[in-house]
Image: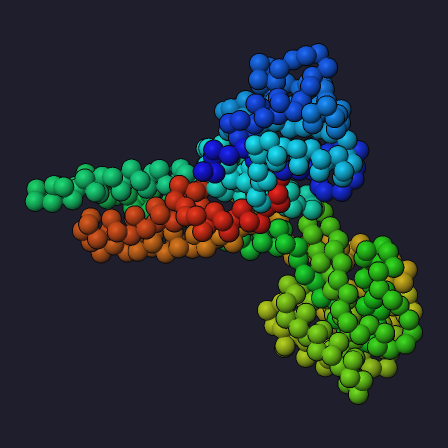
Amino acid sequence: MINQETIVALATPSGAGAIAVIRLSGNEAINIAEKQFKSVSGKQLSKQPTHTIHLGHIIDGERTIDEVLVSVFKNPNSYTGENVVEISCHGSQYIQQEIIQLFLRNGCRMATAGEFTLRAFLNGKLDLSQAEAVADLIASDNEASHQIAMQQMRGGFSSEIAKLREELLNFASLIELELDFAEEDVEFADRTQFKELIDRITLVLKRLIDSFSVGNVIKNGIPVAIVGEPNVGKSTLLNALLNEERAIVSDIAGTTRDTIEDELVIDGIGFRFIDTAGIRDTEDVVESIGIKKTFEKMEQAQVVVLLFSAEEFKTESQRLTIEIEKIKNKFPLKPLVIIANKIDTLNPTEIDALQAQFDGVHLLSAKTGQGVEELKNKLIGFVNTGALRNNETIVTNTRHYDSLLKAFEEIQKVKSGLEMGLSGDLMAIDIRQALYHFGEITGEITSDDLLGNIFANFCIGK
């Protein structure tokens, strides 16, 4: 049923603008559009070549709704693989709705979320991982996530998986063939070559699985918690990083009662900075809740930035050392950046003493901006961008990651079977399972529930 109906939806963001694009797809899309379109040169859309644009008016009986440009894409040379019409109209919300309602009354139905891309997948224009990359491309908000989505949409990840699956399938066929000649005790699959293939697949799967740790942070951004005692300049630092007055700054301790979050792109990587309530003993109920949230955000963050005031170093260096050790012990596995803020208040001799006591401390003045750029460089150093720079395949999708883990597990079973000299019929079971998980990634094996979950996250019109 899904491929029989003609669907319509707004393909541009909702709201008023200079122009809007309304998209139709289905076998009858051109014929339906033709009935509501009057070309200025008298052309019939159905008789025009594919990939052509035509000026005219959308009409409802005797009433003209708008002057438009209509683009015609004939199957199979369209995004969905069906006949597609795209109507560029003026961006009035009234005009958009009038045109959509007109087509709904004349043979179309509203597209569901992601249905155009779903049809592209069902018609073989994209595999499933490429279709998912379309959603990632739309959602990309920095250079790195855009680069990865483009690479996946062009089929880089798909081709790598497809090649492994094809080679494994060839050996699986030979092993299955051996089962038909079990009584003759013959081997069609060379076990030495098969072991080499399994070793190669293992290496590729390991690399792809390991890349998810980088891909996930690139796709979702790296959460960075800015923590420290009250009045050490956490909010001032957030404002300096963002170059705007995002957080309220005052001399009153405990001004920040809740967490404040904002994002910044550094060298193409997204960072989500979280300004937290100052950590101290307090009787204030609201401030106590804020401090509890601070520790929750530290748990969730991938990097912790710990601030202390350089002024306090003069009189309370021992206490600062103890506080820093507490944070290190509480979060031993998290990258920790220790920052001495308000460095502009110290003389050179005091700065030397501070650096001698706190190894690797970052000197900064959030007020003047001194050391802020160096901090950004230090943060980008926590992201392994080598694979990104080398244009290697990086996994960003949790579903792909899960399927890769399952395929890796089955391949390890096959490897153990080879080493123990198991018969082909026993290894064939694990090989089939590995092939199944490879097929899940590219969509050669799907279910209605899986497709429903994936395309429900798309915007309508795509």
128 sits to left or right of 195: right
One can see residue 318 in this view: no
Quadrant of image for the C terminus: top right
Q: Name above or below for residue 86 compared with residue 265.
A: above
345 sits to left or right of 142: right
Q: Name above or below for residue 397 compared with residue 170.
A: below
Q: Which of the pair 191/25 is nearer the observer?
A: 25
| Residue drawn where x is 7% and y is 44% of the image | 183
Quadrant of image for the N terminus: top left
- Rendered image quadrant of residue 7: top right
271 sits to left or right of 386: right
The percent coordinates of residue 360 (x first, y second) are 72, 66
Q: Which color mode does the image show?
A: rainbow
The percent coordinates of residue 150 (x first, y second) are 59, 38
Q: Which of the pair 412/282 is nearer the observer?
A: 282
| Residue drawn where x is 75% and y is 69% of the image | 259
The percent coordinates of residue 392 (x first, y second) are 54, 42
List the single residue furthest toward the front: 62
| Residue drawn where x is 57% and y is 17% of the image | 46
Number of numbered discs present?
A: 0
- Rendered image quadrant of residue 315: bottom right
The percent coordinates of residue 246 (x first, y second) are 84, 60
Q: Which of the pair 214/192 is nearer the observer?
A: 214
Q: Which of the pair 379/43 is nearer the observer?
A: 43
One can see residue 138 in this view: yes
| Residue drawn where x is 76% and y is 39% of the image | 93
